[in-house]
Amino acid sequence: MIMKVEHIGIAVKDIDGANKLFAALLGTPHYKTESVESEKVSTSFYKVGDSKIELLEAIDPNSAIAKFIEKRGEGIHHIAFEVEDILGEMKRLKEAGFVFTRDEPFPGADNKLVCFMHPKSTNGVLVELCQEIRQIP
Ligand code: ZN
């Protein structure tokens, strides 16, 4: 089941400048920054009520974020939906004809398992599914 919009990802060229802008816009500083080596991005997160904004800056010219900005400029990059059971949701959506960029979920930023749906199958919107990684007690 899809539970909520967990965050909106925004591609930026200069995360330090964007951090100043979004801190002023939202009236609150980011609560964490994190580099995701596998995706070659640097991220920062802002709480907005029950949801979040994720800023993404490429740390490598070959990262998907660098290519996105090259093609389309800065702006909204993806919408992330929180799910309880990412494997179950991937199965349900694949059966319904949606296409994923990878077959298996992988560790993303902010303690999440994530996967992305190809924008060609979702009206041009890059959709992320994310599930909180639960610590084993
Ligand atoms: Zn995201």
Image: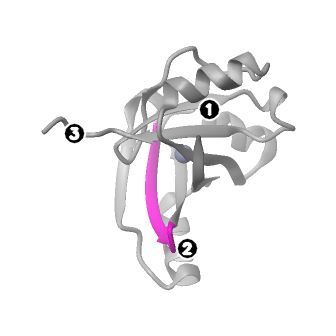
Q: How many numbered circles does the render carry? A: 3
Q: Quadrant of the N terminus?
A: top right
Where's residue 106, x and y in %? 44, 25
The answer to whether the residues at label 3 and label 1 have Cβ atoms under 8 Å apart is no
Q: CA distance from mark 3 to mark 1?
A: 29 Å
Image quadrant of ligand 1? top right
As shown in the figure, which amino acid type bears the numbered disc 3?
A: Gln
Q: Image point 87% across, 38% down: which residue?
A: 123
Q: Quadrant of the C terminus?
A: top left
Sequence order check, earlier mark of 3 and 1: 1
Q: CA distance from mark 2 to mark 3?
A: 31 Å
Q: Which residues are magenta?
A: 41-50
Where's residue 122, x and y in %? 81, 34
Sequence order check, earlier mark of 2 and 3: 2
Q: CA distance from mark 1 to mark 2?
A: 22 Å
Q: Which mark is residue 135?
A: 3
Where's residue 111, x and y in %? 34, 43
Residue 49: tell me if it is visible.
Answer: yes
The residue carrying mark 1 is 64
Prevailing secondary structure of the magenta residues: strand
Q: Image point 62% across, 31% down: which residue?
A: 116
Secondary structure at badge 1 equals helix
As shown in the figure, which amino acid type bears the numbered disc 1?
A: Ala
Where's residue 11, x and y in %? 63, 51
| Left or right relative to 81: residue 27 | left
As shown in the figure, which amino acid type bears the numbered disc 2?
A: Phe
